[in-house]
């Protein structure tokens, strides 16, 4: 395809997350110089990337196998540090 | 002379030829990370790098590798750049003796000039963020000082903590933070979460070089980092009150973020290429919400590359890891001569000590493992005689090769604690630990054939002077 954005002649932005292949993402930032790059963040695995990064970081096809994350990797990621039990004797909530 | 901010330190590096200003246009990725990585491969005189022409940014100012060589570490401590490592550690120990030095409270910090509050907060508007390593989950703030207080005792400034804990930028006002359980912020967060409260924090970015050192120094829970900074600088640390949280932050910072670590919240973070030379893996970790940003006009964003050692982090926390371990061991065992814990933040440490009696040296090794820092590090402790310099690795190798009989000199302890980032730990956070007793056995430990050591000849000291003179004179002839 030869769609471009921002009039910069760059290829259209990625359509899936390079890391987990989810299709939903947010735009976190755009370049202060208009139309040069955007920073995107995957809604599912929270991977973020700049659209001008090398393909090995910004395209699903080139993203290295060893850094990919599956649904299972995401679901089974440990919680650190574990959330402690709430203390019974404190008011709790915001002060 | 001590530096009150990052800018005056960068100027000092520049005067000594230790700052390289890259004026050509570079891309944020992969150039900034790759250049910082490359600087780490330039050796003992590697410079700091300064960039101000970055694709897509209008006014990015970025400093990396500010501590990333022995020359720079020396300049950070206002020592001659050629000062040998061992002497830099010695000087650190000497200045430590002046602890505590009360802070100097200053008004009108330069970072109060510009403020973003509430809905205006956007980290991307203030910081030229970029990725370091390929497998990193995002862009990081990895050289910031995070300030917090003990929620059970918020007015006790001895318990106000300043520590470096890396943060992933996950949104315009949202950071992921990694509190290693052995570190002070983890204690603060645990107390807050048990109460069901958020933990107020301030994040100081772009600091004078000694603040960065103390923020990575494993001090005791009630040893305040600012008062150690005063001792190491030789002048009180200038601090100012952060407007929203009331926390003390460095007067000279480039940027100050204020907000809270949200109580009982965990969210996917990472991976991040870590100081172990391995990625951390993706974990659900605490979330820091930024409610206010204060910053200088045209702030400098300071970052640090880390990866397979040695990188900037190893210089930054090398001496800073040796000295607290040395001080804590000396408190119980004055026989301890020196500690080299510069490898992976002290995951391996080398201790030289005199021996009271057989078995003493391995007890010193075990003690290193039960210091506060040792609980998460000190997986291997090599103990050597008092006449072996732990900073001279060929001497250490000599001790290992001749003083060790694996039949009796290895103390292998099962199921000890270690930080879960140790890639060898299994399950993460649990490991065996090993003391290697590479000292000469003393009575009643009568093993081996060590009665006839070869020592330098008594006349050799005079000959060193004589040869040095002859060489100097010969040099003069040419
Ligand atoms: C660049 C850098 C990054 C660090 N990242 C973390 C981190 O993410 N989490 C952590 O607990 N410690 C991290 N550390 C280590 C702590 O800052 C260090 O162990 C310090 O002594 C802890 O101090 P504390 O005892 O006051 O918590 C980092 C250190 C440096 C220099
Ligand atoms: Mn501390
Ligand atoms: Zn994803």
Image: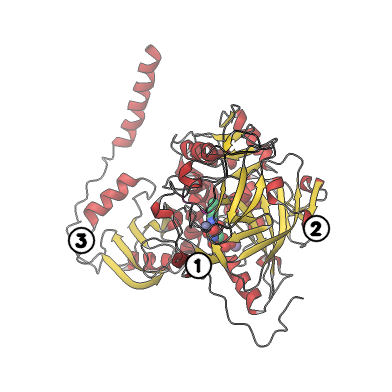
Task: Kindly report the distance in space between the C-alpha atoms of the residues bearing marks 2 and 3.
Answer: 60 Å
Q: Earlier in the sequence, mark 3 or mark 1?
A: 1
Q: Earlier in the sequence, mark 2 or mark 3?
A: 2
Query: Which chain is mark 3 on?
Result: B
In this view, which residue lies farthest toward the top?
B478
Task: Kindly report the distance in space between the C-alpha atoms of the residues bearing marks 2 and 1.
Answer: 33 Å
Task: Kindly report the distance in space between the C-alpha atoms of the residues bearing marks 3 and 1.
Answer: 30 Å
Give the residue pinned by disc 3: B405
SS class, disc 1: loop
SS class, disc 2: loop
Badge 1: residue crowd in 10 Å (few <14, some 14–19, many ≥20):
some
Q: Residue B132, how many percent across, how many down?
A: 52, 45
Give the residue pinned by disc 1: B372
Kindly identify the residue that appears in the image at 21 percent across and 62 percent down: B406
Near-viewer residue (B257 or B221): B257
In this view, which residue lies farthest toward the bottom?
A88
Kindly identify the residue that appears in the image at 34 percent across and 58 percent down: B382
The quadrant the C terminus of chain B occupies is top left
Give the residue pinned by disc 2: B243
Q: How is the image coloured?
A: secondary structure
Q: Quadrant of ligand 2?
A: bottom right
Question: With respect to residue A42, does A12 lie above or below?
Answer: above
The image quarter containing residue B5 is: top right
SS class, disc 3: loop
Which residues make up the magenta segment? B133-137
Q: Residue B223, how many percent across, how many down?
A: 62, 63
Q: Is mark 1 within 8 Å of ligand 1?
A: yes
In this view, which residue lies farthest toward the front?
A1
């Amino acid at each position: 395809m030869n769609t471009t954005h921002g009039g910069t002649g760059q290829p259209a932005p990625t359509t899936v997350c390079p890391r987990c292949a989810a299709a939903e993402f947010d735009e976190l930032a755009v370049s202060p110089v208009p139309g040069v790059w955007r920073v995107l963040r995957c809604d599912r695995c929270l991977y973020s990337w700049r659209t001008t990064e090398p393909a090995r970081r910004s395209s699903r096809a080139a993203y290295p196998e060893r850094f990919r994350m599956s649904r299972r990797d995401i679901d089974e990621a440990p919680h650190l540090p574990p959330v402690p039990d709430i203390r019974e004797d404190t008011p709790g909530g915001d002060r | 002379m001590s530096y009150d901010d990052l800018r005056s330190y960068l100027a000092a590096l520049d005067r000594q030829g230790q700052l390289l200003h890259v004026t050509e246009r570079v891309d944020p990725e992969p150039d900034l990370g790759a250049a910082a990585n490359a600087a780490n491969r330039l050796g003992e005189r590697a410079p700091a790098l300064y960039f101000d022409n970055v694709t897509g940014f209008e006014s990015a100012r970025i400093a990396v590798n500010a501590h990333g060589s022995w020359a720079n570490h020396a300049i950070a401590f206002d020592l001659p750049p050629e000062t040998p490592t061992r002497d830099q550690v010695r000087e650190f120990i000497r200045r430590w003796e002046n602890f505590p030095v009360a802070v100097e409270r200053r008004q009108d910090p330069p970072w109060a000039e510009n403020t973003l509050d509430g809905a205006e907060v956007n980290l991307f508007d203030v910081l030229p963020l970029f990725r370091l390593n390929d497998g990193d989950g995002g862009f990081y703030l990895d050289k910031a000082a995070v300030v917090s207080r003990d929620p059970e005792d918020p007015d006790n400034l001895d318990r106000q903590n300043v520590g470096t804990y890396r943060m992933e930028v996950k949104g315009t006002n949202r950071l992921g933070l990694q509190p290693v359980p052995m570190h002070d912020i983890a204690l603060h967060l645990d107390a807050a979460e048990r109460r069901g409260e958020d933990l107020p924090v301030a994040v100081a970015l772009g600091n004078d070089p000694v603040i960065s050192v103390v923020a990575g120094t494993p001090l005791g829970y009630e040893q305040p980092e600012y008062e150690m900074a005063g001792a190491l600088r030789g002048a009180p640390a200038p601090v100012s009150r952060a407007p929203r949280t009331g926390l003390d932050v460095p007067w000279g910072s480039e940027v100050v973020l204020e907000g809270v670590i949200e109580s009982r919240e965990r969210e996917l973070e990472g991976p991040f290429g870590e100081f172990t030379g391995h990625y951390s893996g993706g974990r659900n970790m605490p979330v820091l919400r930024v409610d206010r940003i204060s910053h200088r006009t045209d702030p400098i964003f300071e970052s640090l590359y880390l990866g397979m050692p040695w990188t900037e982090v190893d210089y930054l926390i090398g001496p800073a890891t040796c000295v607290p371990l040395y001080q804590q061991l000396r408190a119980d065992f004055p026989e301890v001569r020196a500690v080299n814990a510069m490898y992976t933040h002290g995951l391996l440490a080398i201790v030289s000590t005199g021996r009271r009696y057989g078995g003493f040296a391995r007890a010193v090794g075990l003690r290193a493992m039960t210091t506060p820092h040792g609980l998460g590090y000190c997986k291997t402790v090599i103990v050597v005689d008092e006449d072996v310099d732990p900073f001279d690795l060929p001497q250490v190798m000599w001790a290992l090769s001749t003083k060790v009989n694996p039949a009796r000199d290895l103390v292998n302890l099962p199921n000890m604690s270690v930080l879960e980032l140790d890639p060898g730990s299994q399950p993460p956070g649990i490991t065996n630990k090993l003391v290697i007793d590479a000292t000469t056995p003393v009575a009643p430990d009568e093993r081996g054939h060590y009665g006839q050591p070869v020592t330098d000849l008594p006349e050799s000291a005079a000959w060193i002077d004589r040869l040095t003179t002859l060489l100097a004179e010969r040099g003069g002839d040419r």
